[in-house]
Image: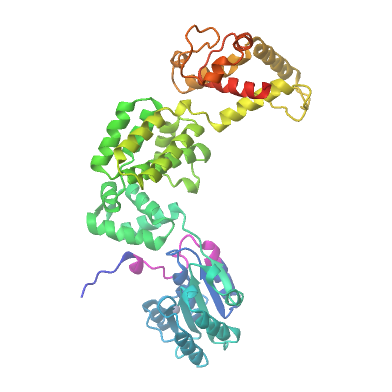
Amino acid sequence: MSNYQVTARKWRPQDFSQLVGQEHVTTALTNAVNSGKIPHAYLFSGPRGVGKTSSARILSKLLNCVHSPNICGECPACLEIASGQSLDVREIDGASNRGIDQIREIRDNVIYAPMNLKYKIYIIDEVHMLTKEASNALLKVLEEPPSHMIFMLATTEANKVLPTIRSRCQHYLLKRIPLDILIDRLSFILQNENINFEREAVEEIAVAGDGSMRDSQTILDQVILYSKDNLTMQSVREVLGIPETSYFETIVSAVASQDIVAILEQVQKYLMEAGDGVSFAENLAKFLRKGLLIKKLPQNHPLLELSEDKYNALSVLFADLEEDDILTLLNLSLELSETLRHEKSERFWIESTMFKMLDYKNRVSLSELRQEIFKLLGRNTQNNNPGIQHNAPNAARPPQPANTQQQQQAQQQAQQQTPRASSFGDKWDAHKKTMGQRPAERPVERQPAQSAQPDIAKPIERQQERPAERSQEKPAAPAEKPERLTDAITNLFEA
Ligand SMILES: [Zn+2]
């Protein structure tokens, strides 16, 4: 017989100090036991593998240990309960004992006093799986149990437990375990098992564990079996089938620098080495989501699930992209993953998406559109519509210090001297400069009214539309995409 014991069992917490990430529960329970306030029914709910049945077992020890309200870990009560051999602390799996007969058996037994311990305890796991009849029978038992009897119910779906059962229990909600706590616990276990490990590898396991200690430990076991006594990032990737982030780092960087060759080469490399089209699209989307979160959240925010080094590296990588740009790329990746689920020629769809991604700068973002509309509304309604003040800095503002007012006037004058149409172009230039590109790289300027050649790319009605007026109104007409957007909105308002 094998002596192998899985990590989750071997390292199961034996007291509340080892039950990490659930201090709100363990503190409340310890205080309650210390003050002698013991209800006859508890309900532990929360995601899988976060410590619900462990809480119930530890609480059973806390109540029954000869040194209660402490856990000595050495008395017969502690030893019996820890080994699962106690006749007074019984565990029942609600998923496989769903019927009324099992609950009737409990009902018939509760009247008998505990054999060895102070309290007789039933721990019913996955209690929401009980049949309706069994739930009703359990409710009867919970209504008036003898004083030596305590029920501890555990469930991943508290909302499926009868409300009448819930209302008879003291309810403790366990949470997903934060990433840093998972990492610390896994590292602690590895150190005690004398296994060398790369911190990055443990982080990846904890991320895959998704807030569950048991899941994290199960993955850890798998990787240890694969990589023996040296836990590396490479072995974690191979076991979990996680592609290197370097594929996506290269793609994001190549999108920002408009390098289609690098992008297509990287796609090819991914499909040869790492996975299929759907996994490519999904992993790219996950990677871009990280980029978006980095723009929005401070470094240590738990939602980021990133070490400091990774955070810094990704911040540099995404520095060239605006939030809107990343959102555009993310939406394209999600569309691609959806498309690839029912389309066969994955390379075609991936490549055409990559071309669309490359064009991200020419996709009008909502915030740009909104800014333009406000600008135009401000221009058209200045001084006669106090409701809209986006471009009317003097309206309904508290008095400003003199120098600020002067600055504003100077700014306004400068704005008035600049033709309206070019302000967006200037912004575009500034934007490009911050993107690390020369303003000269702006798309070829169009001068619709002065151009001798009709522009076939434009819709016909646009060309036939009041050419004289348009040429007077916008003598400079500098930028391409923004200018056409501005025109469209102007026409909309002037129509
Ligand atoms: Zn004890």
**In front here: 32 or 403?**
403
In the image, is residue 412 above or below residue 111?
Answer: above
Front-lying residue, 257 or 90: 257
Q: Residue at x 39, y 51 (%)?
A: 207
The residue at 53%/31% (across/down) is 365
Up-down relation of residue 413 to residue 217 (above or below) = above
Residue 402: where, in percent of width, then height?
76, 18
Front in this rendered view, residue 195 or 318: 318
Q: Is residue 453 above or below residue 144?
A: above
Quadrant of the rendering where the C terminus is positioned: top right
Q: Is residue 22 magenta?
A: yes
The answer to which quarter of the image holds residue 77 is bottom left
Task: Give coordinates of residue 272: x percent, y percent.
Answer: 23, 40
Q: Main secondary structure of the magenta part?
A: loop
List x then y, in percent, for residue 197.
29, 51
Magenta stretch bounds = 8-27
